[in-house]
Amino acid sequence: MAQSIIKQKSYDFALRIVKLCCKLRDNKHYEIASQLLKSGTSIGANVEEALAGQSIKDFSFKMSIASKEARETNYWLRILRDSGVISTKNIEDLIEASEELIKILTKIVKTSYAKQD
């Protein structure tokens, strides 16, 4: 069976988010670390659930949640960058990765909903 690109990308992204959140907590940025950890790891968790979906409707719903979580994560990452809490060079790659996930997930959601019609 072929490996799911979104499954691997969302997992790798979650690992990077966990590492960033550990650094944030070390610097006593607990609230934003908590928000970012929840949304950033939820992307992959919802992708995993979608891939085990019992129907195309279930798959589409879970992928749309993953897409929303990716957008929320992108928001928190931009907040970190623009507030100066994290240096720009350290956060820019994560912002780009979140934008890539958003694009992939948006395409998956649109395609899956089109299959339902």
Image (cartoon, grey):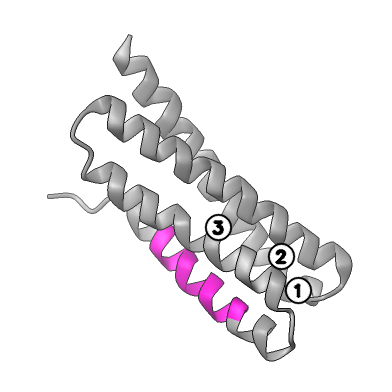
Q: Residue at x 40, y 56 (%)?
A: 44
Mark 3 belongs to which amino acid? Ser
Q: Are marks 2 and 1 in contact (CB under 8 Å)?
A: yes
Q: CA distance from mark 2 to mark 3?
A: 18 Å
Residue range in magenta is 10-21
Q: Residue 53 sits in which quadrant?
A: top left
Q: Residue 29 sits in which quadrant?
A: bottom right
Q: CA distance from mark 2 to mark 1?
A: 6 Å
Please name the residue that numbered disc 2 is placed on: 92
Determine whether the residue tagged by mark 1 lies in a helix, strand or loop: helix
Of the numbered discs in the image, which one, if any, rests on residue 89? Answer: 1
Outermost residue, top side: 117
Q: Residue at x 63, y 50 (%)?
A: 72
Q: Are marks 1 and 3 in contact (CB under 8 Å)?
A: no
Neighbourhood count class around disc 2 (C-alpha, 10 Å): few under 14, some 14–19, many 20 upward = some
For the question of whether residue 66 can be seen, the reply is: yes
Q: CA distance from mark 1 to mark 3?
A: 22 Å
Q: Is residue 62 left or right of residue 56?
A: right
Q: Nearer the viewer, mark 2 or mark 3?
A: 3
